Image: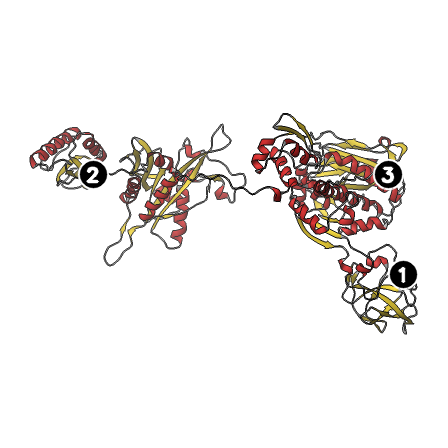
């Protein structure tokens, strides 16, 4: 957004230099990106005095002028007839970049010209192009033209944030200057003289999409004469970088920049049935815009139509068929409020941004529609002649409600670190045209003006107080800091311990996508009623193989295994800590469950000269789980045969469900060959899955010391032959359930099946360690306890000793 100081001062007095103004506006929240002089292009144009005028030897209508430029003389070829010797004239020296092009020294009809004598129009200092600009005698040869004519008009360029559309106009910036300086704001005077014919007899407006176009207003100006704009209007547009077109179009651009309200002028006679219809386009419909480009419209693009066809892309650009031309005699002037989301979506899909769309996207003043319409109608009547038809059409089916905000004085001061009284806060807010009403000693009811679409919450008003009081005037304070030892989050401690232990076991942590393919459930052989089939679908998946949120970490581990195996890395120990997501029937968000899952495949260790390579088995991955729970100081684990329906992707007989204090916390086992085939994996894999929340709940993060006996221990072995179907865990449970305080440890050191052990039976060897904290044990008392325990086991499990 560019603002020339000369234009700005028409609406508010500026009592400070441009540098101080730029600083003040920046401190008020309107960042000034740069300040430049709009007459900077004239720096290389100097005052020259014509010393001699001679005929051009090769052209009847050209002359050769010898011109004094202060530091020497130049020979310049000129075609103007209004100059005389001793005249002071502007001389554009070689290298000068004027709006019409760059000046270079060179031959003209055989005579070298060392510059150019300029007219007012060539210098953009007036509309006179009939001859050379004759300067007043107060000038001195060699003086730069801006200094000689006292030309200076700083242009301030702003980098505005999207929440301040009210400042996308000269009046918007003037309001900010008035608030900062305390000088009054001078609004343009609007006086309309209307003709006798009512507009309702000439035109109509129908809105079929009120949600996209809450308000549409129109006026008609008849018998206009299209032509160039007066110099003052062209100069205003040129000062901020806009090109003048004709008097009607220039007025709409002038009011756009002055008030921030985009307008559009239609050739009234080109509108079929002389009516306007606001409706949405069908996807794929083609429309030719003012720039001559055929554009394929997206669905729901808002269009301005006449009785037959679209004539403008609402809020973005007009159509080619109804533009203002030299032959235009009657004008329909549009001023509307369009839904910002509608304009933003259409402009983005078309890749088309204009001054109008830039403002509509951010939100304009819905109550400023009529003011801007009247201002433009007045200017068109004054500059293009014509008659203003009586009345206007103001179709406002969906009024934008007025905003009311309640703000607390105490809350404002607490947030800003200030001590402003209620009256002072009211004064700050009223400086930017907010209406305030005290509700009590602490609360204010505030009604923002309609052009401040960014003010919606109490915090917005607090920000207004801060910037108007001056951010640099608010004392710097530091928040109170009470030093206290932070209590560490148990989840963080457990997560760190899990990583430490699994890394120590040789596992590498991986992070996989939270998205998997919906076919993963079928590959895992999950039943139809399995909760892991309650997946959350992705609306815009990255790929077809990532169309749902994961309910298990296993597919991600399989994917990492596949990628490594294809790179000849066949021995892997991987783990992941991540969330799984389960769809809930009556909840908007899914149920999130954090898991720790690992995979081990290949060999226990690589083959070396001192050890042979052995393939990993169930007990390796089971040992990793036991190492993890031991490090977390969890209660002793129990491994049981799980329900096959719950974990169908593990191989039967090589899977165990993990319990701690009777609570299921996970599973460990060998992956089924069929599942490996489904995932195109060609070597065995062993996995574990642990519920992270259960680990957190059961972990004993505070460790306690246990005394070590200073007395010697002794061991006894038990060798049993029992039914193959009896789990060894049940034997351990029986031993631990007995009230023997002398048993220090139980160790299984052999399990055997085969000859000479009968079919359907197995041999299990246990080693028990006996010890006391109080005394040395005798063989007699150890043997008595061991014999009693052995008899209980034999009786409970119908087992035999090898000698039986």
Q: Earlier in the sequence, mark 2 or mark 1?
A: 1
Tell whether 684 sits left or right of 31: left
Q: Is residue 396 above or below residue 115?
A: above
Asked which secondary structure carries label 3, the reply is strand
Whether label 2 touches label 3, CB < 8 Å = no
The x, y position of residue 494, in whole percent, is 36, 40
Whether label 3 touches label 1, CB < 8 Å = no
**What residue would you read off at disc 3?**
221
The x, y position of residue 655, in whole percent, is 30, 38
- Residue furthest to the left in view is 780
Q: Is residue 291 visible?
A: no
Return the residue nearer the eye: 707 or 511. Answer: 707
Q: Earlier in the sequence, mark 3 or mark 1?
A: 1
Tell whether 91 sits left or right of 474: right
Asked which secondary structure carries label 2, the reply is loop
Q: Is residue 441 above or below residue 99?
A: above
Figure colour scheme: secondary structure
The quadrant holding residue 617 is top left
Asked which secondary structure carries label 1, the reply is loop
Return the residue nearer the eye: 81 or 154. Answer: 154
The x, y position of residue 204, in whole percent, is 81, 32
Quarter of the image containing the C terminus? Answer: top left
**What residue would you read off at disc 2?**
707
The quadrant holding residue 652 is top left
**What residue would you read off at disc 1?**
131
* Residue located 70% across and 51% down the image: 19
Q: Marks 3 and 1, Cα distance to the nearest angstrom?
A: 36 Å
The x, y position of residue 611, in whole percent, is 24, 55
Residue depth check, mark 3 versus mark 1: number of the one nearer the observer = 1
């Amino acid at each position: 957004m560019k603002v020339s100081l000369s234009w700005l001062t028409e609406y508010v007095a500026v009592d400070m230099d441009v540098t101080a103004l730029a600083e003040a506006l920046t401190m008020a929240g309107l960042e000034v990106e740069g300040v430049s002089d709009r007459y900077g292009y004239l720096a290389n144009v100097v005052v020259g005095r014509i010393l001699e005028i001679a005929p051009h030897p090769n052209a009847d209508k050209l002359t050769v002028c010898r011109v004094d430029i202060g530091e020497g003389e130049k020979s310049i070829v000129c075609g103007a007839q209004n100059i005389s010797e001793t005249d002071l004239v502007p001389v554009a020296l070689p290298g000068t970049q004027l709006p019409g092009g760059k000046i270079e020294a060179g031959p003209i009809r055989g005579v070298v010209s060392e510059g150019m004598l300029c007219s007012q129009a060539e210098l953009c200092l007036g509309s006179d192009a009939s001859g050379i600009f004759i300067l007043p005698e107060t000038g001195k040869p060699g003086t730069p033209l801006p200094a000689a004519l006292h030309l200076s008009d700083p242009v301030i360029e702003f980098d505005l944030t999207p929440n301040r559309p009210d400042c996308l106009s000269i009046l918007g910036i003037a309001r900010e200057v008035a608030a900062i300086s305390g000088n009054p704001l001078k609004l343009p005077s609007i006086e309309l003289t209307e003709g006798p014919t009512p507009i309702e007899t000439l035109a109509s407006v129908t809105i079929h999409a009120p949600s996209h176009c809450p308000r549409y207003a129109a006026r008609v100006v008849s018998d206009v004469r299209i032509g160039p704009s007066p110099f003052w209007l062209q100069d205003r547009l040129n000062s901020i970088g806009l090109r003048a077109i004709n008097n009607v179009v220039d007025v709409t651009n002038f009011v756009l920049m002055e008030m921030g309200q985009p307008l559009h002028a239609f050739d009234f006679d080109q509108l079929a049935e002389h009516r306007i219809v606001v409706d949405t386009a069908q996807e794929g419909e083609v429309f030719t815009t003012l720039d001559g480009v055929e554009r394929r419209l997206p669905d729901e693009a808002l269009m301005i139509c006449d009785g037959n066809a679209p004539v403008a892309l609402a809020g973005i650009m007009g159509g080619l068929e109804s533009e203002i031309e030299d032959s235009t005699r009657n004008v329909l002037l549009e001023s509307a409020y369009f839904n910002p989301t509608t304009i933003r979506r259409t402009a983005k899909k078309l890749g088309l941004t204009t001054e109008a769309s830039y403002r509509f996207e951010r939100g304009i003043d819905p109550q400023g529609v009529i003011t801007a319409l009247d201002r433009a109608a007045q200017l068109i009547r004054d500059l293009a002649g014509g008659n203003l038809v009586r009345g206007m059409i103001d179709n406002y089916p969906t009024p934008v409600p007025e905003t009311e905000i309640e703000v607390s004085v105490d809350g404002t001061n607490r947030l800003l670190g200030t001590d402003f009284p209620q009256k002072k806060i009211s004064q700050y807010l009223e400086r930017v045209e907010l209406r305030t009403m005290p509700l009590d000693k602490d609360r204010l009811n505030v009604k923002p003006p309609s052009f401040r679409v960014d003010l919606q919450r109490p915090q917005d008003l607090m920000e207004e107080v801060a910037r108007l009081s001056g951010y640099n005037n608010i004392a710097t304070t530091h928040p109170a800091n009470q030093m206290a030892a932070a209590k560490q989050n148990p989840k963080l401690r457990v997560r760190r311990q899990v990583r430490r232990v699994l890394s120590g076991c040789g596992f590498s942590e991986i992070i996989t996508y939270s998205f998997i393919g919906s076919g993963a459930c079928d590959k895992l052989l999950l039943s139809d009623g399995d909760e892991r089939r309650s997946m959350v679908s992705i609306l815009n998946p990255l790929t077809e193989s990532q169309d749902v949120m994961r309910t298990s970490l296993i597919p991600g581990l399989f994917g990492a295994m596949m990628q490594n195996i294809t790179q000849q890395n066949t021995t892997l120990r991987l783990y992941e800590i991540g969330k799984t997501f389960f769809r809930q029937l009556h909840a908007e968000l899914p149920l999130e469950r954090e898991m720790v899952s690992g995979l081990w495949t290949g060999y226990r260790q690589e083959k070396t000269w001192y050890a042979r390579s052995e393939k990993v088995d169930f007990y390796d991955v089971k040992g990793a789980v036991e190492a993890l729970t031991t490090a977390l100081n969890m209660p002793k684990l129990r491994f049981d045969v799980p329900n096959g329906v719950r974990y169908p992707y593990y191989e039967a007989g090589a899977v165990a469900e993990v319990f701690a204090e009777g609570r299921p916390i996970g599973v460990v086992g060998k992956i089924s060959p069929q599942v490996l085939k489904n995932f195109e994996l060609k070597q065995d894999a062993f996995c574990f899955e642990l519920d992270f929340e259960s680990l957190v709940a059961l972990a004993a993060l505070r460790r306690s010391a246990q005394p070590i006996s200073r007395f010697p221990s002794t061991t006894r072995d038990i060798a049993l032959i029992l039914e193959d179907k009896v789990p060894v865990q049940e034997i351990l449970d029986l031993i631990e359930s007995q009230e023997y305080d002398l048993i220090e440890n139980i160790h299984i050191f052999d399990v055997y099946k085969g000859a000479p052990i009968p079919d359907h039976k197995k041999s299990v060897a246990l080693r028990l360690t006996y010890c006391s904290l109080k005394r040395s044990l005798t063989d007699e008392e150890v043997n008595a306890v061991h014999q009693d325990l052995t008899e209980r086991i034999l009786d409970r499990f119908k087992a035999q000793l090898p000698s039986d």
